[in-house]
């Protein structure tokens, strides 16, 4: 474990989520990567995660992810993230006057410089309609689900 563990997670958000460079996923996620909270219909694998990022990047409006806080303990990295729609002149009418900010937390396991596991971010994914609420929480306002 090194301070590079947090840099790997930052790279994932900067390159894959914000720039759409899903090729970086093959470099920083282990072949045996497991997504413990995959998007509905996606495999919990590295290829499934790449597909999820590609779909999110291709969505309208585009989203920009920001790591608000990041910390690590042993082989685990926790990132508190926000996501906001990116404004473009042609698509401004598609975005509300006050765009919402999605918030969540994601837990990654990093081993030997590779991300091997991912948990969480259920709050933002639910807000985007990509995940349903966990059992027993339907209708609860302002809930944040972090595993």
Image (cartoon, rainbow, N blue to C red):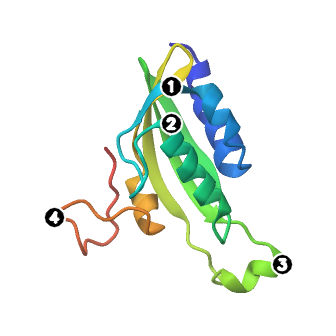
Q: Quadrant of residue 135?
A: bottom left
Q: Is residue 7 visible?
A: no
Identify which residue is drawn at 59% across, 45% down: 67
**Residue extending furthest right?**
89
Query: Is disc 2 in contact with disc 1, using a CB cutoff of under 8 Å?
Result: yes
Query: Which of labels 3 and 1 is toward the front?
Result: 1
Query: Which of labels 3 and 2 is toward the front?
Result: 2
Mark 1 secondary-structure assignment: strand
Mark 3 secondary-structure assignment: helix
Q: Report which residue position mark 2 lands on.
A: 46
Q: Report which residue position mark 1 lands on.
A: 31
Q: Earlier in the sequence, mark 3 or mark 1?
A: 1
Residue 54 percent location from the top left of the image: 62, 53
31 w.r.t. 80: above or below? above
123 w.r.t. 109: above or below? below
Q: Report which residue position mark 3 lands on.
A: 89
Mark 4 secondary-structure assignment: loop
Mark 2 secondary-structure assignment: helix
Residue 57 percent location from the top left of the image: 65, 57
Position of 59 with respect to 34 (left or right) is right
Residue 24 percent location from the top left of the image: 68, 34
Q: Earlier in the sequence, mark 2 or mark 4?
A: 2
Q: Residues within 10 Å of mark 1 (few under 14, many from 20)?
A: some
Distance, label 3 to label 4, CA atoms, is 41 Å
């Amino acid at each position: 474990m090194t301070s590079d563990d947090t840099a790997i997670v930052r790279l994932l958000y900067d390159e894959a989520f914000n720039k759409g460079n899903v090729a970086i996923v093959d470099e920083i996620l282990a072949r045996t990567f497991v997504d413990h909270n995959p998007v509905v219909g996606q495999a919990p694998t590295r290829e499934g995660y790449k597909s999820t990022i590609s779909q999110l990047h291709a969505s309208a409006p585009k989203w920009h992810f920001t790591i608000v806080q990041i910390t690590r303990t042993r082989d685990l990295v926790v990132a508190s993230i926000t996501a906001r729609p990116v404004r473009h002149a042609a698509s401004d009418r598609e975005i509300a006057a006050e765009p919402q900010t999605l918030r969540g937390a994601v837990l990654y396991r990093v081993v030997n410089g590779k991300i091997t596991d991912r948990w969480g971010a259920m709050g933002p994914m639910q807000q985007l309609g990509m995940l349903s609420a966990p059992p027993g929480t339907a209708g609860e306002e302002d809930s944040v689900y972090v595993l």
